[in-house]
Amino acid sequence: MSHVFPRHCHSDLPTAVRGDGCFLVDAQGKRYFDGSGGAAVSCLGHSNARVASAIKDQVDRLAFAHTGFFTSDPAEELADLLIANAPGDLDRVYFVSGGSEAVESAIKLARQYYVEVGQPQRRHLIARRQSYHGNTLGALAAGGNEWRREQFSPLLVDVSHISPCYEYAERQPDETVEAYGARVADELEQEILRLGPDTVMAFMAEPVVGATLGAVPAVAGYFKRIREICDRYGVLLILDEVMCGMGRTGHLFACNADQVAPDILCIAKGLGAGYQPIGAMLSSRKIYDAIRDGSGFFQHGHTYLGHPVAAAAALAVVRELLDNDLPARVAERSADFAGMLHARFGQNPHVGDIRGRGFFWGIEFVADRDSKTPFDARLGLAGKLKKAAFAEGLVCYPMPGTRDGKSGDHVLLAPPFVASDDELAGAMDSLARAVTTVL
Ligand code: PLP
């Protein structure tokens, strides 16, 4: 009997024993195409020799040195490389062990910044409904996913939630795309005014919404307007690119597509590409300088921050992405990827929407295409799709719709950037068979 405490107590999981390119292999020898990179993690597949050897070299040289006492070469080099490619005036990198820690750090940094600059009344965070920012209590409070939050709500700080930018479900038939983007962005201004402009510290959003909606990018112009509103009221813009960053959408940083730069940026998942657990929070020069010239101490930290082996792995990952121009390749191949999806699912009467960017795509299922009515949540469609796809040898990421009925069950696809066209086509065929089985 297993003593591992699993996520699902009644599931009987196969044992993964090997990674082979874009495939995972279980103890029985069954091969699974990693069509979601786990959860948008494995951007380089599972057997990248450069990353593996960087890890080994680093362990041989130095496994661990606490950042309270030392810095390390891989952490310094990785920070330099990230900042050299980062948007705006992002200037400092705070390394952590994953996405939730990056988000948690961002919330605390925003708060401490306003304390340091003499505006301690700024304590409100605004985020968006149908978003996910992580499972630790601060990050969970920022997220708007009711299913993940509800039993923990007594423990969560108060965060205001505005609408996401979710054109498929929420743009009115008589509304232009531009007017829709402006309308939902303006909800931020209304919320700032409602709370009192001098009490709001930050607004947080995912440039492309991942786990909760399934690869939903904002419409053109939305984030520019959000940036303007933040600037008007001195509200910090925190972008959470934990899932959509690191080349996944065809840019090293997803916000480049929206031509905005945040004050704080969170990354994880693709940064370590699954080879090591690592995340990072990138901070603007303004924020870092305020702390350096103020207390001189960021009141936050974890034992494993800046772990040398994790940093060495991530350094090799980012070099691999940049040396092989993988974000640009992902952008070029995006239309073909979309074409494969439309060819297989576009005519399905239960497919309401196919959306995404780069190698980050979502398919939303509906009971009725014209009215965009989701399936009844009690049918458990997402769970059935996951099972059927897995039986076909495909790992994908199905999620249920939201309880308010505003979004339907969807499947998220985030394959490795190194997948061949044939591998992608094979994976789409597996998914099509799984959809036929379930629907
Ligand atoms: N932020 C976003 C946008 C995510 O998608 C996730 C995880 O899915 C997180 C934060 C949390 O990351 P982690 O699971 O590494 O803590």
Image (cartoon, helix red, strand yellow):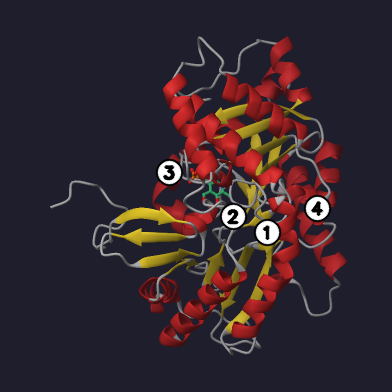
Q: Quadrant of residue 408?
A: bottom right
Q: Nearer the viewer, mark 4 or mark 2?
A: 4
Q: What residue would you read off at disc 4? A: 258
Q: x, y (%) of residue 2?
A: 17, 50
Kind of residue sitting beneath label 2: Ser
Q: Nearer the viewer, mark 3 or mark 2?
A: 2
Kind of residue sitting beneath label 4: Asp
**Marks 4 and 1, the one that precedes in the sequence:** 1
Q: Nearer the viewer, mark 3 or mark 1?
A: 1
Question: What residue sits 79% from the left and 80% below the top?
Answer: 173
Q: x, y (%) of residue 139?
A: 53, 41
**Quick one: 168 or 5, which is closer to the camera?**
5
Is ligand 1 closer than 8 angstroms to the Cβ of mark 2? yes
Q: x, y (%) of residue 57?
A: 48, 28
Q: What residue would you read off at disc 3? A: 154
Q: What residue would you read off at disc 1? A: 164
Q: Is residue 148 above or below residue 219?
A: above
Badge 4 element: helix
Q: What residue would you read off at disc 2? A: 131
**Marks 3 and 2, the one that precedes in the sequence:** 2
**Quick one: 245 or 163, which is closer to the camera?**
245
Distance (Cα) linking label 3 and label 4: 36 Å
